[in-house]
Image: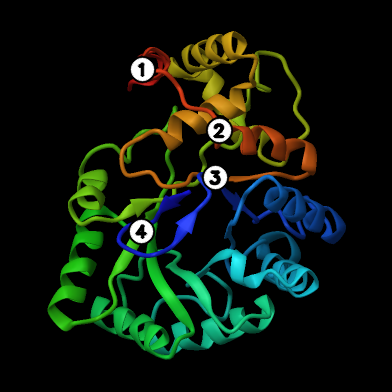
Amino acid sequence: MRTIGNSDLSVFPISLGTNVFGWTADKETSFAILDAYVEGGGNFLDTADVYPYWATQEPTSETFIGEWLAARGNRESIVLATKVGSLEGRAGLKADNIKAAAEDSLRRLRTDYIDLYWAHFDDPETPLAETLAGFDELIRAGKVRYIGASNYTAPRLAEALATSDKEGLARYVALQQPYNLVERGYEGELRDVVAREGLSSTPYSGLASGFLSGKYTPGATVDSPRASKASEYLNTERGPKVLEALNKVAQERGAVPTTIALAWLAAQPTVAAPIASARNVEQLGPLLAAADTTLTAEELALLDEASRP
């Protein structure tokens, strides 16, 4: 288990992303994925009030998770994270909107508290002090334990943390941002802020829309709603080099590229738990295996060299 920032949230090294629940995974399949994740040692669920609204016009992910928690009676053993700010009718980070959205999420999740509540995207139209005051009120009311910033730039994250310190308001304990072997923009100013301020990262897009699973090769046809995005990496200079290095390490270990890509990510400085999703139980196995995979210095160096911009 790993600790997020300076919180007391102890989480499995791989967080289960649930944006597919109600989209490419129906309710029965979603329950099976959740059961298998917990049986494999997992405890860290990542959702949002907007998942997967683009496909269902409903926040199905939170609803499914809430029904599963109620059916299994295991809320206390789960670290539950959701997000605010992107759902139609609940967009933005004004204090009143945050509080209203939290009540909606609590109802759908069938719980009376959220372990980690994310600002899904920065809202430059709302003063940071107002946003943080809204979160702070929820924490004081016992409805939220900790807060995090998702998709913030380095300057805005630093400004938010300084605002919390100045105003005596709740402080972000984590950052969520894209990060993987073919997208390494996090390394630099943003990671410096996270490290300096004692935060942790729980990166998303750890498999680059599935590209790092190894399924995407020249001429291959992949049945996935993310296939067009993932296949774009094949046309870059680094994409094929990264796949070659991934396959080499995977073959030598008797593993699959998915496991190695996530293990590399989990080994990076400031990263507590990469987020990865599965459409079925079969896809979940390689994700869970990453939690038990510690790459050697030589393997990390090989992957690092192949993926350097």
Which residue, given by chain and number where applicable, does mark 1 sit on?
297
The picture places residue 100, in percent across and down from the top left corner, at: 52, 88
Q: CA distance from mark 2 to mark 3?
A: 10 Å
The mark that comes first in sequence, 2 or 1, is 2
The one of 267 and 123 positioned closer to us in this rendering: 267
Which residue, given by chain and number where applicable, does mark 3 sit on?
14
The picture places residue 110, in percent across and down from the top left corner, at: 68, 80
Badge 1 marks a residue whose secondary structure is helix
Which residue, given by chain and number where applicable, does mark 4 sit on?
174
**Which residue type does callout 4 highlight?**
Ala
User: On the rendered structure, is 231 left or right of 240?
Assistant: right
Tag 1 and tag 3, C-beta contact below 8 Å = no
Quarter-of-image position of residue 48: bottom right
The mark that comes first in sequence, 2 or 3, is 3
Q: CA distance from mark 2 to mark 1?
A: 16 Å
**Which residue type does callout 3 highlight?**
Ile
**Which residue type does callout 2 highlight?**
Asp
Badge 4 marks a residue whose secondary structure is strand
Quarter-of-image position of residue 19: bottom right
